[in-house]
Image: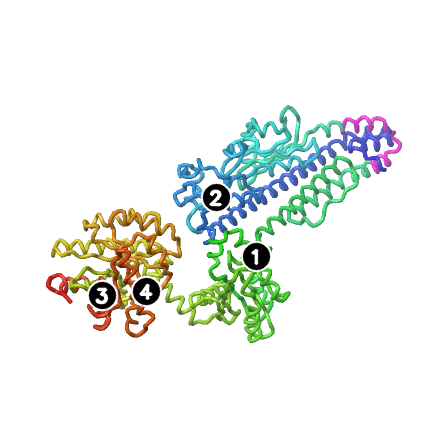
């Protein structure tokens, strides 16, 4: 086994071999040259080391910022965004990385909304008065804050804030322990790395006590002054020892990096050289020079090689480790450095997996497939290709009924089944929660289209998950580049529109994109934009259709029916724009307007004509189940000054698919406060006799489909008879809507149906016409 000597010992051996007097003559001449050379080499080594530290720190900050951006992107996904367990999801994301010790999500007003690790006491705290956060928001920068003691770990940390696409903000509190690992990797006590923050407090140092105590460096102001003067290399007394210090700046945080080497080695070296020079014989001067040059090469060349490798690594070349089999000190430093590079490469790989692959299925994610498509288009790798966008129909029902863990298992199993049916060159990716995007290329476009249809036919409509067999269907959209789009963004938009077309036209089908679909989509977008302005521009109208007591033909009241007077002159019915309003989230604003307008109009009629009318108002399921609906509704009714006993809310049976328990609770609260409740369209949607026994309703409205079947469809007529009889047994009033003929009227009267409504009496009328026909003439009967 080869014995390894220190650099100091090797130099002593070399010069002892040539212990002759001539060295004394040349020592004066060589001393200055060697000192100057060594100082420059130390300066170069320090600069390389500080550049490496700055590069790694910057890379760490950049990857931490990218990871924070990725977390923010995930939290804006619609499925996760509406998840009540956002804090839990955020905590899981926090534990899967080592960049941040804590992550917070703030709303638009800088109030803490979610936090990981979860701490309820921090929820709701407003950070608007924090200068760093307010400045970062105003300047829209992604800067790093000054250091401070973390409330989570009580160690030094810095914070980083980014604005999300939905207007919220995300803050990460950086874990600085990874930065401190740099000192542990440099295994040479004569070389040190110190990082000071912008206030002069130690971030990292060989003396860990200075870091843990957040000590202040007394020479901080001197370092700043020299740095401002571009004096980046000092030979000075530092911590009681003469040292060589290279000063540099980390731009991300304005931290100062100090690469420090003591002069102990130099003193010992030149002391030994001086002693050896005295003993060297003058007569072998040429030999002395030769040996000195040889010794210099043996000392300097490894350092030069190390410096060159450092520069390669700074440029991002981590391919091969540094191989050195020389001096012990350098070998230890290189071994430590190689180990650090291995750690960085592993972390790069983990970050790449997180950034470009789905953690659940292992498939390429949205970023990966987007980059792949961009590269395919930009480099013109193929003349054409197809994209297939697949969406699982009603996947939300699986999550809601069987749980998200089961839903994850379903997604994972389905991804395996999809991949089985694809060719090796096809690219399957999980694009969002329950949506997959597939890249395919075939010899012809017809072949591509036929392959797509065959592929979907091969997918089984059942999956065995644990002990459950789940039946499912898929909706899909397909588009071809460059036939349907010339860029990746436009192509994704095209397949998404085709997929939405499949879902909106019955689901469980494949749609090939066409520009007709684009026109329909554009029309919908235009209609949505116009609808946003409808309330502000006073374009909504209420029409009133009379409801008549069947027993005596007197007017019982009216149902308020909304219409949209579009600026183009068309009167748009509610079945066109109400679903849009529900999708857009403005149904609450429209619904509140209807309650206020209908109650105010009815109060005016009560005051003007002293006529006891009931106003029936349709309530959207989304509106009914919203958190503050009941309080808002009663405030609006109270402001209109109408007698609450004259107000009747109509709900449709499809409200029960949202949440039966919440529906029952909401209806009970409304009933307890005096509002009449009517169950509309009974018998057509999600009817169940159980509802009639559990709901606090006063009125049952029979759907017009049963009324139109009177004396035409015997089975439906019998069902109609049974509904009326059962309702009376439950002390419920019965309203038959859609009455259009005398024959229907006579039959319903014979069955003692309480209230009738339909075109037989009148169509829905503007308030002025209703007032003229039914209120100014109080004797109006039918």
Q: Quadrant of the N terminus?
A: top right
Label 3 vs 2, first from the N-terminus: 2
Q: From the image, tell me which residue sits under label 2.
A: 87
Distance CA(mark 1)–CA(mark 2):
28 Å
Q: Where is the C terminus found, in terms of image quarters?
A: bottom left
Q: Nearer the viewer, residue 364 or 573?
A: 573
The answer to which quarter of the image holds residue 506 is bottom left
Dividing the picture into quadrants, the one containing residue 200 is: top right
Determine contact: label 1, label 2, CB under 8 Å.
no
| x 41%, y 45%: residue | 107
- Identify the residue position indicated by label 1 in the image: 465
Q: Which mark is residue 764?
A: 3
SS for tag 1?
Answer: strand
Residue 282 within the magenta-colored segment of the rendering: yes
Foreground pick, 278 / 767: 767
Vertical order, 717 against 157 (above or below): below
* For residue 553, side relative to residue 628 (left or right): left
């Amino acid at each position: 086994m080869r014995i390894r000597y220190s650099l100091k010992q090797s130099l002593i051996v070399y010069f002892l071999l040539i212990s002759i007097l001539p060295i004394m003559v040349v020592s004066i001449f060589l001393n200055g040259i060697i000192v100057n050379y060594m100082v420059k080499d130390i300066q170069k080594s320090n600069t390389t080391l500080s550049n490496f530290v700055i590069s790694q720190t910057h890379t760490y900050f950049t990857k931490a910022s990218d990871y924070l951006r990725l977390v923010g992107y995930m939290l804006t996904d619609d499925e996760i965004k509406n998840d009540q367990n956002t804090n839990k999801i955020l905590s899981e994301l926090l534990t899967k990385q080592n960049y941040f010790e804590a992550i917070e999500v703030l709303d638009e007003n800088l109030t803490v909304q979610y936090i990981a690790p979860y701490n309820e006491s921090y929820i709701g705290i407003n950070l608007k008065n924090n200068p760093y956060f307010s400045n970062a928001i105003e300047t829209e920068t992604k800067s790093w804050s000054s250091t401070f003691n973390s409330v989570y770990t009580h160690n030094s940390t810095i914070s980083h804030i980014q604005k999300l696409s939905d207007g919220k903000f995300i803050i990460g509190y950086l874990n600085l322990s990874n930065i401190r690992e740099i000192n542990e990797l440099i295994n040479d006590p004569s070389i040190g790395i110190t990082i000071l923050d912008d206030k002069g407090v130690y971030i990292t140092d060989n003396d860990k006590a200075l870091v843990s105590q957040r000590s202040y460096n007394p020479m901080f102001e001197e370092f700043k002054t020299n740095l401002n003067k571009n004096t980046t290399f000092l030979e000075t007394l530092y911590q009681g020892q003469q040292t060589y210090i290279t000063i540099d700046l980390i731009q991300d945080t304005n931290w100062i990096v100090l690469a420090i080497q003591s002069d102990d080695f130099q003193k010992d070296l030149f002391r030994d050289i001086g002693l050896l020079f005295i003993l060297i014989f003058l007569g072998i001067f040429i030999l002395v020079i030769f040996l000195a040059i040889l010794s210099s090469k043996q000392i300097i060349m490894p350092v030069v090689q190390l410096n060159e490798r450092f520069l390669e690594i700074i440029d991002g070349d981590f391919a091969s480790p540094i191989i050195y089999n020389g001096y012990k000190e350098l070998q230890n430093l290189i071994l430590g450095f190689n180990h650090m590079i291995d750690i960085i490469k592993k972390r790069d790989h983990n970050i790449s997996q997180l950034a470009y692959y789905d953690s659940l299925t292992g498939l390429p994610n949205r970023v990966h497939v987007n980059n792949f498509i961009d590269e395919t288009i930009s480099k013109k790798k193929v003349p054409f290709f197809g994209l297939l966008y697949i969406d699982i129909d009603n996947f939300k029902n699986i999550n809601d009924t069987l749980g998200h863990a089961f839903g994850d298992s379903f997604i994972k199993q389905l991804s395996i089944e999809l991949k089985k049916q694809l060719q090796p060159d096809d690219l399957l990716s999980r694009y969002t929660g329950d949506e997959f995007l597939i890249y395919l290329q075939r010899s012809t476009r017809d072949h591509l289209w036929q392959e797509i249809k065959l592929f979907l036919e091969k997918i089984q409509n059942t999956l065995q998950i644990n002990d459950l067999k789940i039946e499912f269907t898929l909706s899909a959209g397909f588009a071809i580049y460059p036939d349907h789009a010339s860029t990746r963004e436009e192509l994704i938009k095209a397949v998404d529109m085709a997929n939405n077309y499949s879902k909106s036209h019955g689901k469980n089908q494949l749609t090939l994109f066409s520009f007709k679909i684009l026109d329909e989509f554009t029309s919908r977008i235009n209609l949505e934009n116009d609808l946003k302005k409808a309330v502000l521009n006073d374009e909504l109208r209420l029409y009133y259709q009379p409801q008549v007591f069947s027993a005596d033909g007197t007017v019982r009241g009216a149902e308020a029916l909304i219409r949209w007077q579009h600026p183009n002159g068309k009167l748009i019915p509610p079945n066109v724009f109400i679903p849009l309003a529900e999708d857009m989230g403005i149904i609450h604003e429209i619904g509140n307007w209807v309650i206020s307008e209908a109650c105010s109009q009815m109060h005016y009629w009560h005051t003007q004509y002293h006529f006891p009318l009931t106003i029936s108002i349709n309530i959207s399921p989304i509106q009914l189940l919203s958190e503050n609906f009941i309080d808002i509704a009663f405030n609006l009714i109270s402001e209109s000054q109408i007698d609450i006993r004259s107000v009747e809310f109509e709900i449709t049976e499809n409200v029960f698919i949202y949440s039966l328990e919440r529906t029952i609770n909401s209806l009970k609260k409304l009933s307890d406060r005096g509002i009449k409740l009517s169950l509309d369209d009974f018998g057509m949607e999600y009817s169940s006799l159980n509802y009639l026994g559990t709901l606090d309703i006063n009125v049952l409205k029979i759907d017009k489909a049963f009324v139109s079947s009177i004396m035409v469809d015997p089975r439906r007529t019998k069902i109609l008879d049974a509904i009326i009889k059962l309702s009376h047994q439950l002390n419920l009033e019965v309203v038959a809507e859609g009455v259009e003929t005398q024959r229907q009227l006579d039959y319903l009267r014979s069955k003692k149906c309480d209230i009738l409504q339909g075109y037989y009496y009148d169509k829905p009328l503007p308030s002025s016409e209703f007032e003229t026909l039914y209120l100014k003439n109080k004797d109006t009967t039918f």
